Structure formats: C-alpha cells, structure tokens
C-alpha cells in the first residue's frame, strides 16, 4: 500500500496528494419504484429533458426474472448540455437482477458522479485505487453518455463515479446516435485515446446521420415568461448538487470522502448532539453533506432511502419562489421541517418530495469559498425562516457568483 501521506502525484504539473482532482458534481441518480410518476415529475414538473433510454432488462437471464416489475428502461436526463445530469433506474428490476442491490434496499441513490480534470487523471485514479486496496466496481467508457470512468463505493455502499468527457448535447438537441456506440469500453483503456472529434469524423466518413440520436420535445406549452424567455415552467435549473447523505458513521464517511476522493472539509455543525459535515470540491460551500442516520426520522424524511437530499440550484431567488408555488400547485409535497442550521452556505431553500419520497433541495444561492478556505462566519449569514418568502432580498458579497450556467435556458 502506498504511503499517501508522503507520496505526491504530478497532476498537470502540480504535486497533489492523489493523482486526480474532482472539479464538480457531474451527475446523480435515483433507483425508483414509481417509474412512470418519477419520469413525469422530473421531466414535466422540474424540466429535465430526456437525452436517452437504455434497456435494463437486457441483463435478465429470462423474461420471467423481470416480468411485472415495470418499466425496463433506464432514463438519462439533462438540464444543460451534459448528456446526463440525472438518471432514474427501476429499483425493482435492479434488485431482481443484482443480489448486492437486494441486500441494501436503502441505497436508492443510483450513483454520485464527479468530474475530474482529464482522462489521464481517470487512468491514474484506477491504478491508485488498486494500490490502496480500494475496491473498484468497474472502469471503462459507457454509452449512452460517452464518459470515461471508474466506479468505487463509499463506506455505506453508495456508488461514486469519477469521469472525464461526458457527451455534450448541443443546439439541435440530438444525443449521439446509437450507431456510434462502437467506442464503448468495459475496461480501463490504454492511453492515449483518439479525441471525440476524430470519432465524429469517422462517423461522417461512414455516412452516419448525426441527427438520428434521441431528441426530447417538451410536452407542456411554453407559457411562462422566465426572465425574458418563454418556458413550460416558471424556473430553470442551472446546477445540480449538493448531494446530502445519511451515513452510518459520519467519521468513516468523512475520512473516505476527504482522503480517498480529496474533498475539502468546509464546515461542521452539531445539531441536537449530532455532528454533520459539509465538504467541497471547488469554490462552492459544499457539494457533499454527511449526516448521521439518526437524523432521518427526526427530520421526518423518508425512511426508505439514505439520501437526505439532492440539491437543484435555480437561476435566482424569484424563480425559487415561483417554483415553490408551481410545484405545490401541481401536487408536489413540500416540507418546512428541515432547519436552516442543517444547510449552512445556502440561504433560502425549498424541500420538495419526488413520487418515491426522495427529498429535493431547491435553492438559488450557494456561498463561495475563496483562496483562504474560510466559510462566512455564522453570525453574518442571513437569518432564514423556512416557509417565509420575502419578496426581495439584500444581496451578499458572493451573490450570483460561482460557476455560471452556459448556453440558452430552453
Ligand atoms: Fe454515470
């Protein structure tokens, strides 16, 4: 085993403690029971666009193995140009096909997926995990999505994926044609690899129709004026995360995310005697929050999942207010019971439930942490009462800062 306390790794000319650096949350997913309602909720109500489906049932030994278990499609969805930022898979089919999934039914998070800097970082991460005895679930390059990746587990069994180079869906809204899935890898590739542009050149030479991939069309009419653009709902998701987890042992999970994946601790909170930890990969206050399982019942959150919440950042405060009204009007359940002390770095947030009971944390502002690594002192943060929505807010020093959304909203 490598002595990681001393060994340094050259990452793009900089000597780091591990051979990769996570830059941001790339995508996330749930395993759901209520598939039809789930797809409707995430597409029609929240505005995710479907980018592709795949067939989960193809791994069944016989049709009987998954008969009567519902939709066999995996759903890949996007809010921007990343081919997928969110996925839904059928929990009952997963459990029918996979004894590990059956053994841990509370792991309704399908994956927590982080972008690193380049393909070499993925290759070196795979070797480093191997050296350190970190169990690798699998490595390679999956389609749909075309991202090069490796998968490992956290101490509670949550799947974490590191990736480079997810497919970008551009102005015409078409995903990559399935006929281009020939560059799929089910093991770590030799480096270097040809660029994606060269793959497209090859496809053009082969006469592939580049507009033959999936293209989502919204079923709802675009009737809302959303800051100057007509959209089918009165808000726009501009970023995903943070991912908030309930874990058996906060210290063990903290050690894994800090030392194995390289997350930076930002802040910790003790709430009613329970220690909660907030970590970041970039300038956001946190993209990962760890809470002890004991809080799940105290907060009235769904006992079926170890997901405390999945964050969705909306473009601004006005849109957040509009979203709360829109989602309530469309029958979504909203709770005011999650206390703001449990989400430092975010001011106003709405906690909304999906059809399986997963909690979604809608917010618009994320505190930004600068070069000195210090979060804003608690006493100068705004005081927020859940369920109260002032008409306008005073700006803060880091209002509208952090990674901006690229491209048009619809
Ligand atoms: Fe993934």
Image (cartoon, grey):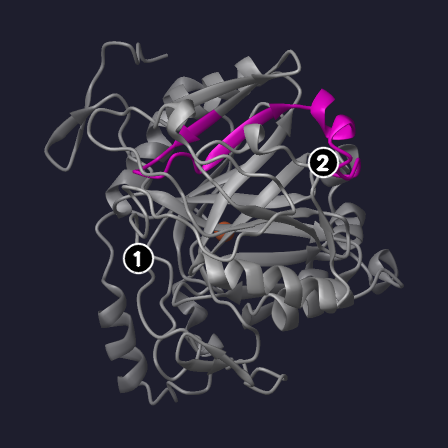
User: Which quadrant holds the C terminus?
Assistant: bottom left
Residue 390 seen? yes
Q: Is residue 294 magenta?
A: yes
- Judge whether 266 appears above or below 202 on screen: above
What residue range appears in magenta?
Answer: 278-305
Q: Residue at x 40, y 63 (%)?
A: 82
- Label 2: how many Cα within 10 Å (few below 14, some 14–19, many 20+): few
Q: CA distance from mark 1 to mark 2?
A: 38 Å
Is the CB–ligand 1 distance for label 2 below 8 Å?
no
- The residue to which callout 2 is attached is 100
Where residue 344 sits: x, y (%)? Answer: 48, 31
- Judge whether 259 appears above or below 171 on screen: above
User: Which quadrant holds the N terminus?
Assistant: top left
Where residue 307 sits: x, y (%)? Answer: 65, 38
- The residue to which callout 1 is attached is 404
Where residue 180 sits: x, y (%)? Answer: 41, 74
170, 20: nearer the viewer: 170
Where residue 275 sits: x, y (%)? Answer: 57, 15
Q: Residue at x 46, y 86 (%)?
A: 212
113 sits left or right of 102 in the view: left
Q: Is residue 404 magenta?
A: no
Q: Residue at x 65, y 50 (%)?
A: 30
- Number of numbered discs overlaid on the protein picture: 2
The quadrant in which residue 131 appears is top left
- Judge whether 313 appears above or below 217 on screen: above
């Amino acid at each position: 085993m490598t002595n990681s306390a001393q060994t340094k790794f050259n990452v793009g000319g900089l000597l780091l403690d591990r051979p990769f650096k996570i830059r941001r949350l790339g995508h996330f997913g749930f395993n759901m029971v209520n598939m039809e309602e789930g797809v409707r909720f995430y597409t029609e109500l929240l505005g995710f666009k479907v980018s592709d489906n795949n067939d989960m049932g193809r791994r069944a030994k016989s049709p009987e193995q998954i008969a009567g278990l519902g939709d066999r499609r995996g759903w890949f969805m996007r809010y921007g140009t990343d081919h997928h930022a969110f996925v839904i898979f059928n929990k009952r089919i997963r459990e029918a096909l996979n004894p590990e999934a059956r053994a841990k039914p509370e792991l309704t998070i399908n994956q927590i997926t982080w972008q690193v800097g380049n393909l070499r970082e993925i290759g070196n991460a795979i070797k480093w995990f191997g050296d350190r005895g970190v169990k690798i679930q699998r490595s390679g390059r999956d389609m749909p999505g075309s991202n090069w990746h490796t998968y490992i587990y956290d101490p509670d069994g949550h799947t974490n994926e590191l990736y480079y180079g997810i497919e970008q869906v551009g102005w015409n809204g078409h995903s990559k044609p399935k006929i281009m899935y020939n560059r799929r890898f089910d093991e770590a590739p030799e480096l270097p690899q040809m660029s994606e542009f060269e793959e497209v050149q090859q496809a053009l030479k082969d006469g592939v129709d580049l507009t033959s991939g999936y293209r989502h069309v919204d079923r709802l009419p675009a009737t809302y004026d959303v800051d100057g653009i007509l959209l089918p709902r009165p808000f726009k998701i501009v970023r995903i995360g943070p991912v908030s987890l309930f874990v058996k042992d906060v210290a063990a999970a903290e050690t894994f995310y800090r030392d194995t994946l390289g997350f930076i601790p930002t802040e910790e909170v003790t709430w009613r005697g329970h220690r909660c930890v907030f970590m970041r990969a970039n300038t956001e206050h946190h993209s990962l929050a760890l809470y002890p399982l004991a809080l799940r019942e105290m907060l009235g959150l769904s006992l079926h999942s170890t997901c405390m919440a999945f964050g969705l950042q909306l473009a601004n405060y006005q849109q957040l207010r509009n979203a709360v009204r829109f989602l309530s009007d469309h029958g979504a359940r909203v709770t005011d019971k999650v206390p703001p002390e449990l989400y430092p770095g975010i001011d106003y947030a709405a906690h909304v439930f999906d059809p399986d009971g997963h909690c979604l944390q809608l917010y618009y502002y994320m505190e930004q942490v600068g070069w000195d690594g210090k979060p804003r002192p608690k006493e100068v943060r705004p005081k927020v009462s859940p369920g109260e929505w002032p008409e306008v807010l005073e700006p803060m020093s880091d209002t509208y800062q952090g990674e901006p959304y690229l491209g048009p909203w619809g």
